[in-house]
Every structure is written in structure tokens, then in C-alpha cells.
Image: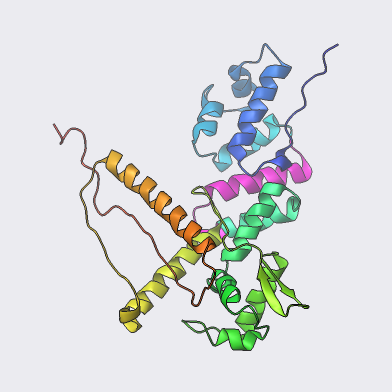
Amino acid sequence: MLQKPLAPNVFDYLDFRRYLKDFLHFLRQNNPAFRFQTLVEQFGLHSRAHYIDIIKGRKLTSAFLDSYIRICALEGNAALYFRAIVGYEQASNDAEKTSCFNEILALSPHLETVKLEQEAYRYFSKWYHPVMLSMLDIYKGTNDHREIAKMFKPKISALQAKQAIQALSELQFVSWDENRKQWTVHHKFLRCTDKARVVALKEFHKKMIDAGRQAYENDFHNQDFSTLTLSTSVETKKEIESMIVEFREKIMEKVKTDVNPRLVVQMNLQLFEMSKPLSKKKDR
């Protein structure tokens, strides 16, 4: 006798659309006679295509959130978790996204994808965390956070330096070797995919853009600054984006083989649109 398929566990997901996609697969496996019309009649969905539209990217509004919770037979913390991952994906502002993320952490702290997201969240929550990581790669023999704080441009307080070192140590990015009396850097980079959704990463980018502006004003002679304003096709823009990714990878590989680091630098790469796209009708 064939064993019935098990429903996917919502706590294994950070992407609610992927969860709904897998749950739909479960529904079809469990009931070969499954019809979308049943979801309309029993759970009040807007149309037979509503479920598929949500999976493809349509917003899951509060009017239908309870319907999907009932479709998936979620109760208690499972229902709360589903609400949280929906809110996290669809948050309209950073404060709302952060609140939902904290709910996710409280409800499913052991989920691997959540732990990875949390790691990135903490790392990028302060602009000086990544800078401190590079600082400890240079000042390997300095275990005095007050001395390291003095090396920062722009400046940070001794307390901020102490908290940054503590955060990096708890994340296991660095450790102090008592025998050798020096820092060991275990990870020089924290890679985030282009789909990274952590709020802190967005804030980190803002801070580094501001730092670049300050460097331009106060330390112009010690930086390389250039801009390009271009007209491109959509295809060429995508190709440029790929070239930037490739260039960034080459930079990181170069830094990995650098045996004598002497200073910390920040490189900002930004490609953004400064016009509305030309419509196909006007192109004729």
C-alpha cells in the first residue's frame, strides 16, 4: 500500500510563495481529483486562478490571508509563522520588514535559511561591522578595541568598536588566538545573493554611499572617483550588470591573495537608471 504524501512543513520555508507552490503539489498528489474551483467554493478565493497568481507574484492581501491559512490547515504557531513570512516578503517599509523578521526568528530560530538571514542581518546592521572585520585583518596583534577605534575613518567610539568585535566573534568571523596573541580572520567576506532581503543590507549600502560622499568632500586626493552617463539598450544594461558582477569577483579574488594588507578601503559600485525606458511604440 502506497504511503500518502506528507504536507510540507511551513517552518522549513522563508519564501511563502515557494511554500504555497509545494503545498499545491501536495494537494494534487493527495487528491488526483483536485480542482481549483473547490478552493473558490470552500475557502472564498477570488477566482480559480487566484492561487496560481499568488505563487507567480500577485500580492496576498489581508482579505485572503486567512483563506490560505485554512487551505493549508495551519494552526497556532504555524499560522503565525505563515503570517510572518508573508509580511516579511510583502512589507511596504523597513520598519515593518524588521518587525516581521523578528517574529520569524522568535517562531523558527533553528531554520537554516533563517539563521543565514539572521547572520547577514546582524553583520550588516552596523556599517562598521564589515570595516572592523577588515581592520582585524590588518591589526592582527591588537586586542585593544580602544586603539582600533582610533584607526576608523569616519571615527567610531570605543564602545562601538568593542561591540563590533563581540558581534564578529559571536558570528565566528574572527577569533583571538591567545597563544599567538593575534586575531584569526575566518571569513573575509559575507556573500549575499542579489535576492538578499535583509533590511540591514539596504541600510548598510546607504551608509557606505554617505561615507563615499564624506570622503569626496574631505579626502578627495586619496580616492579614485569616476562616473559614466550612458544610453543603452535593455540587453546591454543586463550585460553591464554581469560585467560588474564579474569585476567584483575578480576584486575579491585579488584581495584573498593579498599577503600584506595595510589599510581598509571601500569600493561602491552602483548602476541605476536615470530615465524612463523608451516605449516600443515610440521606437517605431
Q: Nearer the viewer, residue 38 or 205?
A: 205
Residue at (82%, 13%) from the top-left corner?
2
Q: Is residue 229 above or below residue 216?
A: above
Q: Is residue 166 above or below residue 232?
A: below
Q: Which residues are magenta?
A: 74-96
Specify the quadrant that holds the C terminus.
top left
Quadrant assignment, res 69: top right
Q: What secondary structure do most residues of the magenta stretch adopt?
A: helix
Left or right, 242 with reference to 171: left
Quick check: can you spot residue 224? yes
Residue located farthest toward the left when viewing the structure as drawn: 284
Residue 263 spot, x, y in % from top left: 48, 77
Is 88 part of what is drawn in magenta? yes
Specify the quadrant that holds the N terminus.
top right
Residue 201 spot, x, y in % from top left: 52, 60
Quadrant assignment, res 62: top right
Q: Is residue 24 above or below residue 102?
A: above
Residue at (50%, 63%) from the top-left corner?
255
Residue at (55%, 55%) from the top-left corner?
191
Q: Nearer the viewer, residue 93 or 280?
A: 280
Quick check: can you spot residue 46? no
Residue at (61%, 81%) from the top-left corner?
161
Left or right, 258 with reference to 170: left
